[in-house]
Image (spheres, rainbow, N blue to C red):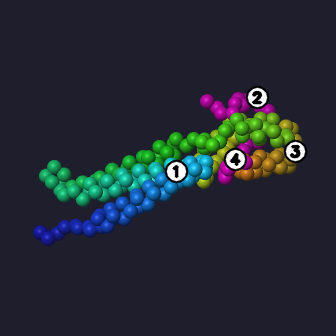
Amino acid sequence: MSGHGHHHEHAPLSGARLGLTIVLNLTITIAEVIGGVLSGSLALITDAAHNLSDVISLVVSYVAIRLSLRPRSLEFTFGWKRAQIMAAIINAAVLVVIGLMMKTPADVDAVVIKTALEAVSGVRNLHHVHMWQVDEKDRHCEGHVVLEEMLLSQATIILSSLEECLRADFGFHHCVLQIETERGHDQRLVLA
């Protein structure tokens, strides 16, 4: 079995395509930063930051492909093939960190939202609020709303008004508001 071997010629082609993808994404990122600064669009700047994270991920993958092309040696009998596995682990870890570090969107002021929602007739308090941005377009908001004593049918009308305010005025796409009555528990906007 002396002629046995695995030979894969995909790496140079994959590397070239990945290089082109990096250049295109970087170009888009730069264009979005310039467009965002000139127009004052936070959405473009946010999307540019997202694209930059994609570029970094692609660069890690590109470097791993280049390393995997290095020849085998007595020290590295498998060559550098595991570089691609390490790149996958690094990229996965970054996704996990970005996911665990979700934060309130940069252009959202929780106090302004609290003031707007508490101005709706029948609302006494908004508290225990969580807001986060899943990606450049998908925002989520959840919280507890204390209402005055009323019929459930009236409460659902107010709930719909609050959700519409969050969507139309603050750009939240997924809103979950829990209706409560005064229960004497902690009603801070954000619980520590």
Direction from residue 183 to residue 109 in the image, left or right? left
* Circle nearer the N terminus (2, 3): 3
Q: Residues within 10 Å of mark 3 (few under 14, many from 20)?
A: few
Q: Nearer the viewer, mark 3 or mark 4?
A: 4
Q: Where does the image place residue 84, in percent across and percent down from the top left? A: 32, 55
Q: In which image quadrant can residue 123 be found?
A: top right
Q: Residue at x 69, y 33 (%)?
A: 189
Question: Would you name the residue on which mark 4 appears?
Answer: 170
Q: Nearer the viewer, mark 1 or mark 3?
A: 1
Q: Where does the image place residue 146, in percent across and percent down from the top left? A: 78, 37
Mark 1 vs mark 4, CA separation in Å: 22 Å
Q: Is residue 180 visible?
A: no
Question: Would you name the residue on which mark 3 appears?
Answer: 151
Direction from residue 58 to residue 142 in the image, left or right? right
Q: Residue at x 44, y 46 (%)?
A: 94
Mark 4 vs mark 2, CA separation in Å: 29 Å
Q: Is residue 33 visible?
A: yes
User: Front-most of 70 and 99?
Assistant: 70
* Circle nearer the N terminus (1, 3): 1
Q: Residues within 10 Å of mark 2 (few under 14, many from 20)?
A: few
